[in-house]
Amino acid sequence: MSTRLVLKGITKRYPAIVANDGIDLTVLPGQIHAVLGENGAGKSTLMKIIYGVVKPDAGALYWNGEETPIANPAAARRLGIGMVFQHFSLFDTLTVAENIALGLPAGIRMAELEQRIAATAREYGLDLEARRHVHTLSVGERQRVEIVRALLGKPQLLILDEPTSVLTPQAVLGLFDTLRKLAAEGCSILYISHKLDEIRALCHACTVLRAGRVAGVCDPREETEASLSRMMIGAEPPAVEHRQPSAGRVMLSVRGLSLPKAHPFATELARIDFDVHAGEILGVAGVSGNGQQELLAALSGEDMRADPQAIHLGGVPVGRRSAAWRRARGLAFVPEERLGRGAVPELSLARNILLSHQGSGTIRRGLVRRSAIHVLAGNIIQRFRVKAAGPRAAAASLSGGNLQKFIIGREVARRPKVLLVAQPTWGVDVGAAAQIRAELLTLRDAGCAVLVISEELDELFEISDRLVVLARGRVSPAIETSRADLDLIGRWMSGLWDSPSETRRAEQTHA
């Protein structure tokens, strides 16, 4: 049988770690092949080697049966390899169309490209505006740009890293249909996901990595989620215990929050109302780009345009207060963008502590206490099992999942009264995701009011006490999680909660 891609003995060493240690991998034409592993297992490094971003120290790569060193991404694209990165490679100051043009052959007319972008986006259910500047996009919308850019290249091999994090449950099924169609036409797909149910439903083969080595190769359709988890982390992920909350007083109250667009492509917020009580988790569902970015900016204090009375923190109006003022009074915040907003890439983990810990323990008489921030960073690394070289490791050196664990650990360590979290387990492996969710529940049980914005509906159903849905800048009524289901929330994500038929259906279903 012919092969599309064969890796033999691929090894990549860094000063503190061996990222890939003699990896063998075979991908057939028309095969959807999963690559599964914990955060830091070497998946991203291996994909970057295939795409020409990283050069291996040893081993060989064979493309369509011939040994083919890939010098750079441009060479990979010429061969017919497309990739969607976990950390996106987009220029903020360029438009969607201009970013996509950079990955295509020279000479294409922009008007024609914008039409192709629109057609491809419609076909795959990925809403995109070709003339919008990337710096105005949410993380989910940026991922859509990467997916469309890869598909426009008509690849023979498509590498997808966590592609369903931006999609509704209904759209996920549509994407799967499209990927199966691409595979039937001969396109090979390398599919990286931490969602074991997706891998079992979609993929024909699976290579499992653990600590930079191949831990096993299997047909995921013949495995259970438990067996895949054991192969990946050596055990099944710990079960998340969700006890009934004992909700206390309202700690975060939003009343009539309306904000005009901050830029032409922003989402306008309209008459948003909800409360978050001490000792509860309120989940916010919705497809990326429906106002999540704008809502978090208003709640965190990054955007201070809100009416003073529209947002109350612990009973105090804070609509025009700064982020620093709110942090000093018990607010903690985990943004969806890890590098650049959640952490400064070039700074060490210890120095990144100072982004949210600026009390007497870390700063005294205006001077940073280096020993204190190193101890605090070390404790977070140990408690959250962050794979890093230590407190002095640069934030950019961590895998996406490990950096997420560190950022969440940094905010949890502040023992906040109110915690805002965006996409808490995006791109995080099943073991780490279970740990993060357990920490959020522990924080809730300690009396913290937690607001979680996530596009992972399974996650919201697992940890949330109540749910609201954000669609086109409007928020639905809150519903107890025990009274909701995926179908209902999926429909509400299209903004249908206030139609008479939807109201009757919800009442009949959950009476």
Image: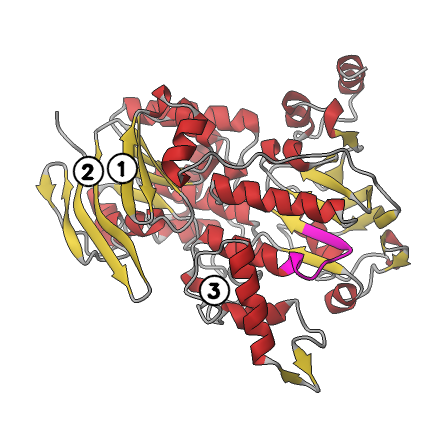
Q: Residue at x 87, y 55 (%)?
A: 314
- Give me the disc on residue 395: 3
Report the colour scheme.
secondary structure
Query: Label 3's element?
Result: helix
Picture layout, residue 365 above or below residue 407: below
| Mark 1 and mark 3 residues within 8 Å of each other at the beta carbon | no
Residue where numbered disc 1 is placed: 157
Farthest residue, direction top: 508
Residue 120 shows up from this direction = yes
Q: Which residue is mark 2?
A: 5
Q: Check residue 499 in the rendering and tell me which mark sits there, or answer none.
A: none
Question: Nearer the viewer's eye, disc 2 or disc 1?
Answer: 2
Q: CA distance from mark 2 to mark 1?
A: 8 Å
The numbered mark, 3 or 2, whose residue comes first in the sequence reads: 2
Specify the segment rendered in magenta: 411-420
Residue extending farthest to the left is 66
- Residue 115, horizontal then vertical, whole percent: 43, 39
In the image, 440 versus 421, the foreground residue is 440
Quick check: is 414 in the magenta stretch? yes
Disc 2 or 1, which lies upstream in sequence?
2
Q: Position of residue 33 (x, y in %)?
A: 30, 32
Tell me the quarter of the picture where residue 380 sits: bottom right
